[in-house]
Structures are given as C-alpha cells and as structure tokens.
Image: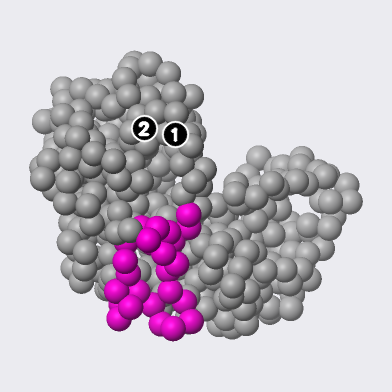
C-alpha cells in the first residue's frame, strides 16, 4: 500500500497545532515530513495562515542536544528561540499521523559563511557561502550528529536533503551571469577543490591540479564565447576534462557521498532514512546525485521528486532507479501541489498510476499549496493503493 505523506514546516503549526494537524489527517495523509533543520526562506503562506509572509531563519527549529548536535566547531544555529518542533510533533501524533524528521543538512549559509574553510571551494578558489563540503571531516561529523539528534526526538523516520555536494546554483542569492551556463558549466563551477576533496581526487586517480586547470579553462571559454549545450551533459563534461579525468572525478565524488550517507544512516540508530536523490551525477542543487544502487547500498531509501511540475523528469528518475535494480519499496515518489505545478485534480492521474506500489507518495507542501488541493492526493491514490504493484517502468 502506498503511504501518503505531506511536507510541512513547523512554523505553520506554531498557531493551533492541534487544529492544523487534524486538518492534515482529515485530508487523508498518514505521515508528515516535518522540517527539523531547514535553510533560510521567505514564504508567502497559502494554507496554514493565508497571506502571512514568513521569514524562516536557517537552522534547527528545536533545541538541539549539545551532546549530539555537533562538535564545538559546527553546531546547527537556533532558527527560533522556541522549540517549534516539539509542539508540532506532539500535535501531529495526537492526530494519528506519523512524523518524519526532515533535515536540510549541508545547505547552511550561517555555517558556511562563518567557516569558509569548511565550505565548498570552487576551481577558482572561491568559497560558496551556502554550501558545506561533504569531504571535510568536521562537516561529516556535523551531518551525522544532526541525524542522531533528530532521530532521538521521537520521529518515526528521517528525510535527508542536501546530504552530498551542492554547488553553484543557490536560489537564495540574487545570482546574475552575463552568459547562459550549460548544465556542465554549472557542474564544473561546483567541483570542490578544498584540501579534503583534492585528497579524494588523488585517491580516485585524478591529479587535483589538472582538475582545477581544466575545469577553470572550460568555464572561461564559455564566458568568453558561449556555446550551446550538447544533448547530453556527459558530452560537455568529458570535453572539458577529458574522459579519464572526468571519470575519476565522478568516482571521487560518489565515494565521498556514499561514505557520508553510510555514516548518516548509522547515526539514525535503525530508524528508516530517506534521501532526496537523483541519478544525475552532475546535480548540484540540493538533491544528492549518484548511481541509485550505490546510494541505497548505504542503507537509505530514495525520495525521487520533481517539484517543478515536470512529470517526464520524474519518470526518468524512476526509470533510472528501476534500471539500477532499486526495489520499489525503497522509493518515495515526490510531487508538488503548488498551484503552478498541479493545475487541476486530473494532473495527479498519471502520478497516481506511477506511485502505486512504491513505499510512499510525498507532496509539497502544506504551507504553500492552496487549501483546496490538500485532499487531492489521498483521493487520487485511494482507488489504486490496493493494487500492490507499481506501474511498469522500463529501463532507459
């Protein structure tokens, strides 16, 4: 049976948590993926408190346990002086809902800005002030400590986002460029050259200096005279680095990512862990990009999403997971209920057919989706949840 989950931020439950929780349960959801650690945002609330502009600070929305929440150098900042999570979790449980602790891990502008030596450092030597580097030992301890701390707060499962390499894209800044960057250019600008990553490149058989020079030269060429993107990102990436260096860089990044996830899954203490993931190894905007089979071998399940309303892109992710041999019960299918992504109830029909038989279908987000849409997912899933088998997804 496919479970029906809903992402939500605890800010929405700071007023009438019991009433908000009952509303979610009555809409047919069985679990809430509640943000425990989140990045900074400015949201115009649509459902919980329509019209409120919520300024959401980066950090933990609860009181972290200092013995678990990180070593002295890196600790999640407090996003609020109140323990918003505790009240929300209690209300959700009282309404009969399971609670999944949603953690945004390495996307932390306060920590990356305060500790540039632990931030992702691009091939030009510039640190990114929003992204911690997953190869740094202190960052890895912090990432695992977050999982342990949230797992100890009575959640049923964990939902990890930004547990891997981030990079150039960052919607929180007013990014401007003078040319169009191809996907490969964004990836090249996201390659980290901090000492820990350079060691990882060396262990994978790559010369770190060659990585820096080749990647920087490729970006400079695009800035000097823009070229259109090749049909496949792989082609532009290989042209930039050469095949042997390109493959070694991917091996290094996957090794860093999978070892980070193994540590995070271990820190969960046996609780199920979901990872916002993609099969695209060039991803650098929040989803963890690597071979789906390699990711699941770390002990995590995969949350495969397209939150932009592109159903074809979601199907590609599901096909890639199927081709890698990932079992449907290790997959959550994620979709956006925002008005610009789900225009009508009928827009959920293809998703319903696809999601049936997977572990869960998760929908984004209680705070932002128009209230009338809240009941659509459960109603759409109800006729098919008993089928027990996912739609056949042919390998790519």
Please determine whether, in this image, residue 28 is positioned above or below residue 146.
above
- Which residue is under mark 1? 52
Tag 1 and tag 2, C-beta contact below 8 Å: yes
Residue 217 x %, y %: 82, 63
Gap in angstroms between the C-alphas marked 1 and 2: 6 Å
**Residue 292 visible, this orientation:** no
The residue positioned 12% from the left and 41% from the top of the image is 95
Q: Quadrant of residue 361?
A: top left
| Residue closer to the observer: 110 or 301 | 110
Q: Quadrant of the N terminus?
A: top left
Q: Secondary structure at mark 2?
A: loop
Q: What range is drawn magenta here?
A: 57-81
Residue 298 x %, y %: 32, 67
Q: Quadrant of the C terminus?
A: top left
**Residue 42 visible, this orientation:** yes
Query: By what rule are the colours in the image chosen?
Result: one colour
Please determine whether, in this image, residue 1 is positioned above or below residue 351.
below
The residue positioned 37% from the left and 20% from the top of the image is 347
The residue positioned 79% from the left and 59% from the top of the image is 218
Residue 106 x %, y %: 48, 64
Task: Find residue 49 and name its label.
Answer: 2
Q: Quadrant of residue 293?
A: bottom left
Magenta residue check for 72: yes
Q: Is residue 199 left or right of residue 276?
A: right
| Residue closer to the observer: 359 or 7 | 7
């Amino acid at each position: 049976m496919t479970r029906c989950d809903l992402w939500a931020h605890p800010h929405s439950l700071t007023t009438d948590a019991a009433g908000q929780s009952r509303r979610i349960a009555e809409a047919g959801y069985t679990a809430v993926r509640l943000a425990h650690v989140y990045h900074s945002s400015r949201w115009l609330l649509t459902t919980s408190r329509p019209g409120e502009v919520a300024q959401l600070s980066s950090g933990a929305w609860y009181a972290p346990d200092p013995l678990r929440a990180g070593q002295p150098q890196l600790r999640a900042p407090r996003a609020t002086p109140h323990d918003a999570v505790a009240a929300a979790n209690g209300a959700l449980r009282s309404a009969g809902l399971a609670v999944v602790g949603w953690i945004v891990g390495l996307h932390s502008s306060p920590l990356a800005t305060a500790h540039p030596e632990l931030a992702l450092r691009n091939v030009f030597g510039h640190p990114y002030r929003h992204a911690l580097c997953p190869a740094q030992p202190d960052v890895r301890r912090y990432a695992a400590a977050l999982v342990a701390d949230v797992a100890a707060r009575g959640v049923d499962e964990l939902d990890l986002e930004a547990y891997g390499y981030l990079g150039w894209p960052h919607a929180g800044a007013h990014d401007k460029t003078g040319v169009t960057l191809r996907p490969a250019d964004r990836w090249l600008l996201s390659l980290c050259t901090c000492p820990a990553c350079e060691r990882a490149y060396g262990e994978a058989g790559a010369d770190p200096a060659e990585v820096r020079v080749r990647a920087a030269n490729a970006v400079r060429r695009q800035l000097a005279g823009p070229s259109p993107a090749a049909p496949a990102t792989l082609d532009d990436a290989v042209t930039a680095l050469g095949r042997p260096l390109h493959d070694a860089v991917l091996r290094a990044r996957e090794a860093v990512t999978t070892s980070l996830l193994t540590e995070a899954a271990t820190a969960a203490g046996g609780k199920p862990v979901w990872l916002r993931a993609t099969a695209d190894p060039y991803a650098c905007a929040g989803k963890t990009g690597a071979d789906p089979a390699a990711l699941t071998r770390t002990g995590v399940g995969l949350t495969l999403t397209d939150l932009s309303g592109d159903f074809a892109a979601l199907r590609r992710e599901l096909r890639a997971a199927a081709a890698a041999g990932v079992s449907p019960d290790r997959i959550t299918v994620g979709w956006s209920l925002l008005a610009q992504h789900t225009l009508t109830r009928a827009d959920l029909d293809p998703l319903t057919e696809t999601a049936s038989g997977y572990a869960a279908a998760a929908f984004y987000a209680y705070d932002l989706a128009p209230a009338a849409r809240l009941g659509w997912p459960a109603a759409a899933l109800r006729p098919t949840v008993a089928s027990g088998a996912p739609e056949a997804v042919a390998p790519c």
